[in-house]
Image: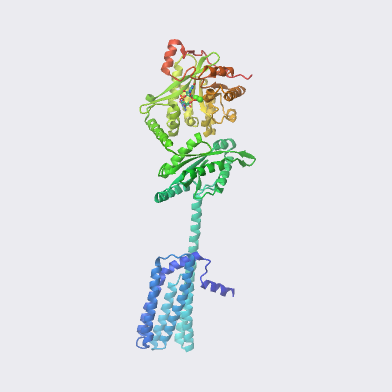
Amino acid sequence: MKRVRAFIRWMKVDPRHPDIARAQYNELKTQIPSLYALLMVNAVAVSYTHYDVAPFYLTVGALAAILVISAVRLVVWIKVRHLDPAPAEAVRRLRRTIVIGGLIAAIYITWSLSLDTYGGPEERGHIALFIAITVIGCIFCLTNLPQAAVLVMAVVTIPYLVYYLRQDNDVYTAIAMNIFLVCVVVLQVVFRNHRSFCKLVRSQAETEVLNAENERLAQTDALTNLPNRRYFFSQLETRIGKAKAEQSTIAVGVVDLDRFKQINDTYGHQLGDQLLGEVGKRLNTLSLPDVVICRLGGDEFGFLCPGDPNEATKTGDRICELLSAPYQIGDLQVSVGASCGLALYPQAGTTAQVLFGRSDYALYHAKTNSRGRSTIYSAAHEALMRSEQAVETALQRANLEEEFEVHFQPVVSLPDRTIIGFEALARWHSPSLGEVRPDRFIPIAERTGFVHNLTPFLFAKALKQIKALPGDLCLAFNLSGHDITSPDTVDTLLEIIRSHELPPQMVTFEITETAVISSYDAAEKSLRKLKTAGAKTALDDFGTGYSSLGYLHRLPIDCVKIDRSFLAGIEDPADEGVVRSIIEMCRSLQMLCVVEGVETRGQLDLVEKLQCRLVQGDLFSGALSYDVIRESVDKTDKVAGLPLSVSTQLDALKLSAS
Ligand code: C2E
Ligand code: CA
Ligand code: CA
């Protein structure tokens, strides 16, 4: 009973395998026209051989009716040859085909058996042949719809067999039996083919699912489960195309975590990864209409949203806020900030690369001017970027020997007011741009890699000039983030010290906290190498960055330089407090301390009161060219009215613990 039910379900085309039904229908479309052509040809042949023996309505009349029906069906199937129906529709069409197949088979067998009553053995032999080739031909044409093949075979061969059995004619019964058995065998072949067909369709469907999954994985970031950089850029291209066509706007946002590198370096990469995973979770919960958020790499995320500036800013701010709440990772609670740069299409650019570059530029400005919030790329940024481009172009063409030199600012020891050495400060005279200040060109030289050649050149020049001056003068030299993380540059600098035969302890390399933070491990390694070679190290602009005590403890630092911004306000008790506490910290850590930017007598008095031993500033002298210093020394033995120190023992200038 169960089998019968299963058979009936199968005969009705099982809707649980819609993909197979659809594939079946698409195959069938190409076969059925041949089936009707075959029916028409065979019908013409059989009515021709019976034309003289059978009545007119059974030959010409029936033939005309059969040809019309077949032709109509043929046209119907030719018309649907480009149709790719939905699965449910395919099931419906297959069912209809089975029913029509059964009906046509019934018409054919009725007609054939009616004709069989006329004519002699030759005509009857033709009927047997007609039935055999027609039914076998039909079964083959219905290979992809075995249900119809079974029905046609049953409707034709069973009545035929019964018909002859009842007539008790051995030869024709044998023929009928033969046809029946051949059909059974042919059906076996059809079933086997159909099974392989189903298997193929299923494996194709599985492959499609796998491909789709692979495609999804290839566009997903494993750590955060967010779409990845590849997806971001393909979406950006698509959205730009759409915006162009619809004349609409889009916004491209780049979000970068503040202090992530610091956390990664302090607590290790595993915790860094966990933190990024948490960031991913938060971003995944954010469901904003028409906004896609992706991880671009490292601690950088990108998002795309409609281009209304207010809405885009709101979205950026919301993401920054969401990411800034503290994270609980194991026993540890950490906080990172986030800043966001935005660029709008078409105002900021019309290609993916330009838009991304501009949002990145806006991010860079967000990080310096409005941390924790969004900054939209504006006309002011455009002007700035253009001038940076001008600097970049001029740098690329610059001739080191002719355009760059070093100026020196005296480092003065207190209370005796002698010059113990100089800080070397780069000066660039560009033929196209005129004088360009170092804080403008150094970052660009860093970004373009030009600093790789510039630093050794300036250092060698500074060293040579300092050595040419009388006395044992110290040289303080600034290194950029790029320099301190490049082992090559560090080796070159040490080699320059060796080749100039200057005691390494007379050289202090100054680095800023920002330079260290961007790549802590590499920076620490370089600083150790410099220290091991005997050179001194100083943390520059102290107080402006993170001013982390942790750095002072862990890094091999000899000296702290208090940023000149504190001096400007030192008469304010708050700033005085900061300067005092930094000086005291240096004292307890047994470090040298330099106060920069002393411009007035009042400031100097306060610094002296705080017992700081080293100062720099315009009150004594700004940066001077070598020629000016040389001339002054030759004439007066002094620079800016101050004598050069006879012998400098930097270590003796350390603030002693009291
Ligand atoms: P910095 O290392 O903090 O250098 C001190 C800056 O303050 C110098 O500006 C100096 O001219 C200026 N200055 C000194 N005393 C006073 C003062 O009393 N009042 C005021 N208002 N300013 C004072 P400069 O030469 O423009 O250099 C700017 C920055 O560029 C430097 O800051 C340093 O970070 C960077 N830099 C300069 N030369 C080099 C270099 O050769 N390599 C690298 N990597 N950076 C350099
Ligand atoms: Ca400096
Ligand atoms: Ca400084």
The answer, for residue 105, to whether it is visible in the render is yes
Residue in the picture at 53% in, 71% down: 10
Q: Residue furthest top?
A: 636
Give the quarter of the figure containing the C terminus. top right
Q: From the viewer's perspective, is residue 122 above or below residue 449?
A: below
Q: From the viewer's perspective, is residue 578 above or below residue 45?
A: above
- Residue 323 percent coordinates (x, y): 56, 42
Q: Tell me, what colour scheme is on the image?
A: rainbow
- Residue 601 percent coordinates (x, y): 52, 16
Residue in the picture at 49% in, 60% down: 205
Q: How many marks?
A: 0
Q: Nearer the viewer, residue 534 or 647?
A: 647
- Residue 89 percent coordinates (x, y): 47, 67
The answer, for residue 196, to whether it is visible in the render is no
Q: Residue furthest right?
A: 331
Q: Residue furthest front?
A: 310
Q: Nearer the viewer, residue 532 or 327?
A: 327
Q: Nearer the viewer, residue 611 or 487?
A: 611
- Residue 357 percent coordinates (x, y): 44, 40
Q: Is residue 39 left or right of residue 4?
A: left
Give the quarter of the figure containing the N terminus. bottom right
